[in-house]
Amino acid sequence: MLNGIDYSHKENFKWISMIRQPEFVTEEVFKWACKELNDKKGLDTSKVKFKELEEGLCVQMMHIGSYDEEPNTIRKIDEYIENNNLKNDIGSLLKDETIRRHHEIYLSDPRRTAVNNLKTVIRIPVIKE
């Protein structure tokens, strides 16, 4: 379980930002787009990677409000996991050696949305016990 992790210091977490792409975006299309950005705009895309993510079984919950209040939502997710014969699977490896991670999907633009209206899907990978 995630008990003991201090979510109030998320700025210290190692994180990855991902953007969902349409199905037609293959690695070949991605490489072409990176080259175009470099050639036409001079943007360095050397750190950008094409990655497919297969998540597997997860528990997720919509969090509405401040990011600072997410620990309350995560506690509810932890309770659900415990009460439904599931086990938190953060850190486990999938078949392709991908590490299963906590996910947050930001549905609101914090520059344009009041803090109490921010919507974030919090997703925790699990396995059945």
Image: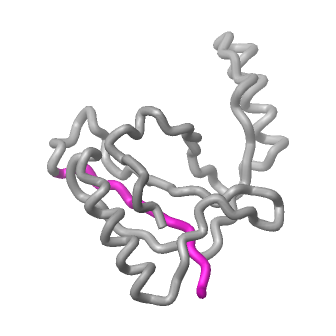
Give the prevailing secondary structure in the magenta stretch: strand
Depth check, front residue: 5 or 122: 5
Query: Residue 102: horizontal and vertical position, in percent?
Result: 52, 57
**Which stretch appears magenta?**
117-129
For the C terminus, the quadrant is: bottom right
- Residue closest to the far top: 42
Query: Residue 64: horizontal and vertical position, in percent?
Result: 23, 58
User: Does residue 125 show up magenta in the picture?
Assistant: yes
**Residue at image x 56%, y 68%?**
125
Rendered view: 23 above or below 108: below
Left or right: 5 as drawn, with respect to 92: left
Left or right: 9 as drawn, with respect to 115: right
Depth check, front residue: 80 or 64: 80
**Residue at image x 36%, y 52%?**
107
Rendered view: 83 above or below 5: below
Query: Residue 119: horizontal and vertical position, in percent?
Result: 29, 54
